[in-house]
Amino acid sequence: MTTPGFIRDLRTRIGHQLLFLPGVTAVVLDDQGRVLLGRRADDGGWALIGGIPEPGEQPAEAAVREVHEETAVRCVAERVLLVQTLDPIRYDNGDCCQYMDVTLLCRAVGGEARVNDEESLEVGWFSPDALPPLREPSLTRIKLALSEGPTWFEPAPVPAAED
């Protein structure tokens, strides 16, 4: 993931301290029900398309922008699949981030899938029953996209009853 300019700016002031950031993930399906994936340049693994919204950018707008920037596919966001705070991660350069991820189901409406920036080694469409190796969070998001269930979120703890 390329670091947006506003975050590089913040890093000059705060160093490697933990940043809590918004993030978006897009589960893009085409008319045949295939899933759009990219093989990441940073770790070589296959993953869903995602990124960081720019300041003031809506999550759906950011997801559509990220998909086009990374894959040249045009899509529209249809519904929220998942809202989740992810575990903190430390990047190779020492930066620490924690993301509040909004995952959206998107429908492809145009463009040909191809590597469109430096973040991906490959991009492609995959049938849900013939996916390449994926990490569990991506598999969970795809499962939610293929179901008709409600938006998933981590429920708040139930407060203890007062006597």
Image: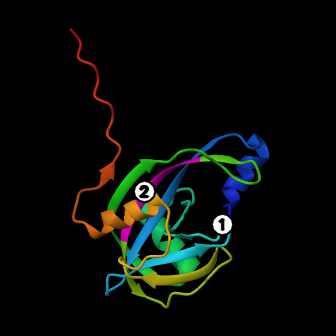
Kindly check if marks 1 and 2 are in contact, taking CB atoms under 8 A apart as contact: no
79 vs 162, nearest the viewer: 162
Examine the rendered structure and indicate whether residue 66 appears above or below residue 137: below
Q: Position of residue 89 (x, y in %)?
A: 62, 48
* Residue 160 picture quarter: top left
Q: Is residue 28 left or right of residue 149?
A: right
**Residue beneath disc 2:** 102
Q: Position of residue 90 (x, y in %)?
A: 67, 48
Three-letter code for the amino acid on which mark 2 is drawn: Val
Q: Is residue 158 left or right of residue 110?
A: left
**Residue beneath disc 1:** 43
Q: Nearer the viewer, mark 1 or mark 2?
A: 1
| Quadrant into which the C terminus falls | top left
The range drawn in magenta is 98-105
User: Disc 2 on helix, strand or loop?
Assistant: strand
136 vs 104, nearest the viewer: 136
Examine the rendered structure and indicate whether residue 137 appears above or below residue 109: above
Q: What colour scheme was applied to this rendering of the protein?
A: rainbow
User: Disc 1 on helix, strand or loop?
Assistant: loop
For the point 42% across and 49% down, the residue is 84
Label 1, label 2: how many angstroms apart (C-alpha)?
22 Å
Res. 6 mark: none
72 vs 145, nearest the viewer: 145
The tag earlier along the polypeptide, 1 or 2, is 1
